[in-house]
């Protein structure tokens, strides 16, 4: 199964409270999934596919060691993707923190801040061949 998007732009959710792209905070107890998603995607635009980002966030959030990953290899990947997962449309980045997500023709993603000109071009359908999807709402209004 392929979990990736191609030539797609995910807008911020209709009920996103952020006016601008905001860096998600960590908690006292450690890293949060949104902060890990942000760090990986912001530091290396167009490096990760959705699958790769979700998996990398999982192993960092669970603090799996390099030794365990080496020993178990693809088993960890298969185990992670054996259960249904929410896609990045349900991520807190578009739902709460004001980030659009662009996936290029290779399925690699980059964050686009809500306040940017680039965001407006994507969201208004001003980019050829790019499907626009709305981030999922936080509430069921």
Image (spheres, rainbow, N blue to C red):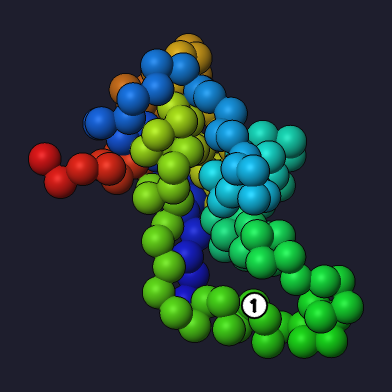
Q: Position of residue 67 (x, y in %)?
A: 88, 78
Q: Residue at x 57, y 59 (%)?
A: 54
State which quarter of the image contains the C terminus: top left
Q: Residue at x 51, y 23 (%)?
A: 21
Q: Position of residue 68 (x, y in %)?
A: 81, 80
Q: Residue at x 80, y 77 (%)?
A: 69
Q: Is residue 132 above or below residue 18?
A: below
Q: Position of residue 73 (x, y in %)?
A: 77, 83
Q: Secondary structure at mark 1?
A: helix
Query: Does residue 130 appear anywhere in the picture?
Result: no
The residue pinned by badge 1 equals 77
How many other residues sit within 10 Å of disc 1, few (<14), some (14-19) or many (≥20)? some
Q: Is residue 119 above or below residue 140?
A: above
Q: Residue at x 74, y 36 (%)?
A: 43
Q: Residue furthest front?
A: 28
Query: Does residue 94 appear anywhere in the picture?
Result: yes
């Amino acid at each position: 199964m392929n979990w990736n998007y191609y030539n797609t732009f995910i807008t911020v959710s209709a009920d996103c409270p952020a006016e601008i792209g905001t860096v998600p905070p960590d908690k006292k107890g450690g890293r949060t999934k949104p902060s890990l998603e942000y760090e990986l995607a912001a530091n290396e635009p167009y490096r990760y596919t959705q699958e790769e980002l979700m998996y990398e966030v999982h192993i960092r959030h669970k603090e799996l060691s390099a030794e365990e990953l080496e020993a178990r290899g693809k088993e960890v990947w298969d185990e992670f993707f054996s259960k249904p997962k929410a896609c990045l449309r349900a991520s807190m980045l578009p739902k709460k923190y004001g980030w659009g997500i662009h996936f290029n023709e290779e399925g690699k993603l980059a964050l686009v801040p809500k306040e940017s000109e680039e965001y407006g071009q994507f969201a208004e359908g001003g980019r050829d061949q790019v499907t626009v999807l709305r981030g999922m709402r936080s509430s069921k209004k």
